[in-house]
Image (cartoon, rainbow, N blue to C red):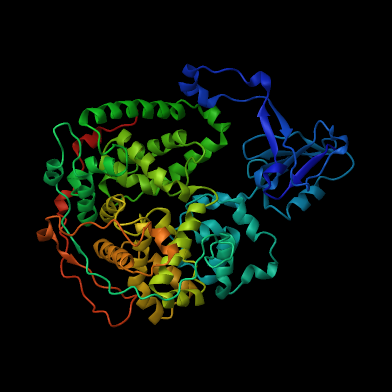
């Protein structure tokens, strides 16, 4: 039997380091690097060398001369192929996640099943539907493609079973990649736990995303936040959307945007008229520099157009046979097609199965996989793209705006979900400052880690507001006013509105999940924006704001970048927001005294040019 090492830990010192064989390491010129064929060069021969061990715990091989010895972490294992029955002695072939195939491990005097049984103590194995000889590792991740819409309509027992079988899809609404870390945390549990009562549901959720407790000693920067009097919450008014005329007045003769800070303040306070979004979003997302001239932007678009279609050509040129050998590209395409088919069809831009908008949605997402092949496509990205394509009405501009947006959102979709963990921790910190009583109630119902806000954060409320409202919400957030992490204050504002019902009706864990899920398309965007801004102003005026909160909101010495109130637009203000339900009963309660009137004709149709948009 060939010597081999298998480790279940994550110590990088005990992982085989694979390098390309010297004869395959041919020099490539810059011209070849730029050609699409370079992306699909196949490496036929690999050699491997083991990294030196530094922890002292790794196994050593006799005399250190075993040519075929290898060592790898179980977190890198993708599949195991077994020998055909009746074909001599048994053997196993391990395939790693980067599609590297290790040398066959032969069992000259024993049954390979003993090793399989041992491995199953640490990983979940299941038989491949295409090849019974192949065992897939962590096969549950195929359920990523399942839709999340019906998750919270299930009875408690069914929900528990889903969490046990596939915690990511069940609890995190099926958007990001299932990681080995999540599965490892739930493996090997006692069968008696298969029917845990709902009161223990939070234990599953805590295991599913380790480290979400903000009061753990190992959490860096943890600060005990006692009840602080934040003072009276100010009344916020919003203005009408920035018009095309207002935008034009702020452009000089060469096309530069003047008074950028003032323009951002106006956008934050009222959003943009729809006719202006196609121009302004490119600046807000960083596709166009604010200080660029019209000529510079024209040159940039030409450059970006060439770059886009070169990337698009890469995946368009891949044959079916090549795609069969590239599992990652194949998986990306499969996920994209499923997500595109689930796109919200209530918007005319995406009506019909063969609608050009849906085709472009697919093509842009596939091209993004070429742009960032390491991240590739993760379920939920299509939600971020569809409003951008609707507004831009142009394939190339939509792609680069999406790429810029993904630069902001990248951490949400990474395998380790560190970005999501951090945001949930920060949200819990803010909510505890605003209302420790409400937090205590949520904790008493096993909901203290705010997992029900996961979808809000992951795709920036895309499925919580109507299509037109999300356009308004996103453009306001892209101004980066009035403070850092304003989206977390939006979460606080929504929870404030729901606090009374949750507590008065004594909602438990399942009821809270179901209630929050059913808020979708029922949240008032203007009211939420008013409340969130009021919370930010209330915090910045507090002289005893905890350091942890200052860091989350990016406040320096209790100063916040607050839109000026005297920008000459008072006559356009029309909405007054209610004050906080979080604070003491001594505060007056105000009601909305105005309403927004976005003309339906403003958004009713898409340019006739859209019908001529076809994929290259």
Q: Which of the pair 79/448 is nearer the observer? A: 448
Q: Quadrant of the C terminus?
A: top left
- Residue 251 position by quadrant: top left
Residue 217 in which image quadrant: bottom right
| Quadrant of image for the N terminus | top right
Q: Is residue 390 shown to the viewer in this render? A: yes
Q: Is residue 338 left or right of residue 520?
A: right
Give the residue at the far right of this rendering: 109
Q: Position of residue 421 (x, y in %)?
A: 50, 57
x then y, percent, for residue 409? 42, 48
Can you give x and y, in whole percent of width and height, for residue 447 in the image?
49, 71
Placement of 571 over or under 350, stated as above or below: below
User: In the image, is 219 to the left or to the right of 91?
Assistant: left
Q: Name the one closer to the observer, 208 or 134.
A: 208
Determine whether, in the image, residue 219 is placed left or right of residue 72: left
Q: Residue at x 72, y 35 (%)?
A: 102
Q: Front-most of 124 and 425? A: 425
**Could you tell whether 231 is left or right of 564 in the image?**
right
């Amino acid at each position: 039997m060939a010597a081999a090492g298998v480790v279940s830990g994550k110590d990088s010192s005990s992982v085989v380091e694979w390098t390309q064989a010297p004869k395959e390491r041919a020099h490539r010129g810059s011209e070849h690097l730029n050609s699409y064929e370079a992306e699909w060069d196949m490496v036929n021969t690999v050699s491997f060398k083991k990294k030196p061990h530094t922890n002292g715990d790794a196994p050593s091989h006799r005399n250190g001369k075993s040519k075929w010895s290898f060592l790898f972490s179980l977190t890198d294992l993708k599949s195991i192929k077994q020998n055909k029955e009746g074909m001599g002695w048994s053997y196993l072939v391990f395939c790693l996640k980067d599609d590297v195939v290790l040398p066959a491990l032969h069992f000259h005097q024993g049954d390979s099943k003993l090793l399989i049984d041992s491995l199953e103590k640490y990983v979940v194995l299941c038989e491949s539907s295409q090849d019974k000889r192949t065992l897939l590792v962590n096969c549950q991740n195929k359920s990523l493609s399942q839709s999340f819409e019906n998750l919270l309509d299930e009875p408690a027992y069914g929900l528990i079973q889903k969490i046990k079988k596939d915690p990511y899809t069940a609890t995190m609404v099926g958007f990001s990649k299932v990681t080995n870390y999540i599965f490892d945390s739930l493996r090997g549990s006692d069968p008696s736990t298969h029917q845990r009562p709902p009161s223990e549901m939070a234990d599953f959720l805590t295991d599913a995303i380790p480290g979400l407790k903000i009061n753990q000693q190992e959490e860096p920067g943890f600060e005990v936040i006692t009840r602080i009097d934040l003072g009276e919450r100010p009344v916020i008014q919003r203005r009408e959307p920035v018009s095309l005329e207002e935008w034009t007045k702020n452009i000089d003769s060469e096309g530069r945007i003047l008074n950028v800070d003032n323009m951002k303040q106006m956008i934050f306070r009222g959003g943009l008229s729809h006719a202006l979004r196609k121009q302004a979003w490119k600046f807000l997302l960083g596709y166009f520099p604010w200080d660029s001239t019209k000529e510079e932007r024209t040159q940039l678009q030409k450059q970006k157009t060439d770059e886009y279609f070169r990337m698009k050509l890469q995946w368009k040129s891949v044959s079916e046979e090549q795609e069969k050998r590239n599992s990652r590209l194949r998986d990306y395409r499969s996920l994209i097609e499923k997500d595109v088919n689930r796109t919200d069809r209530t918007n005319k831009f995406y009506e019909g199965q063969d609608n050009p908008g849906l085709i472009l949605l697919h093509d842009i997402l596939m091209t993004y996989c070429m742009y960032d092949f390491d991240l590739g496509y993760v379920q939920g990205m299509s939600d971020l793209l569809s409003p951008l394509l609707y507004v831009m009405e142009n394939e190339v501009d939509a792609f680069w705006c999406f790429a810029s947006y993904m630069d902001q959102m990248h951490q949400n979709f990474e395998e380790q979900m560190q970005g999501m963990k951090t945001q949930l921790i920060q949200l819990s910190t803010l909510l505890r400052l605003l209302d420790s009583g409400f937090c205590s109630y949520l904790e008493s119902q096993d909901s203290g880690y705010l997992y029900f806000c996961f979808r809000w954060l992951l795709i920036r409320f895309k499925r919580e507001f109507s299509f037109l409202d999300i356009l308004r919400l996103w453009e306001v957030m892209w101004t980066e006013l009035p403070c850092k992490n304003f989206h977390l204050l939006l979460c606080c504002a929504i929870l404030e509105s729901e606090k009374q019902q949750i507590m008065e009706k004594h909602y438990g864990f399942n009821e809270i999940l179901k209630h929050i899920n059913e808020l979708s398309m029922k949240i008032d965007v203007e009211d939420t924006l008013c409340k969130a801004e009021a919370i930010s102003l209330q915090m910045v005026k507090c002289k005893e704001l905890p350091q942890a909160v200052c860091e989350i909101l990016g406040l320096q010495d209790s100063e916040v970048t607050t839109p000026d109130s005297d920008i000459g637009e008072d006559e356009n203000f029309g909405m007054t927001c209610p004050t906080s339900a979080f604070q003491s009963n001594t505060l007056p309660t105000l009601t909305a005294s105005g309403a927004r009137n976005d003309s339906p004709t403003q958004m009713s149709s898409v340019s006739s040019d859209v019908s001529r948009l076809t994929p290259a």
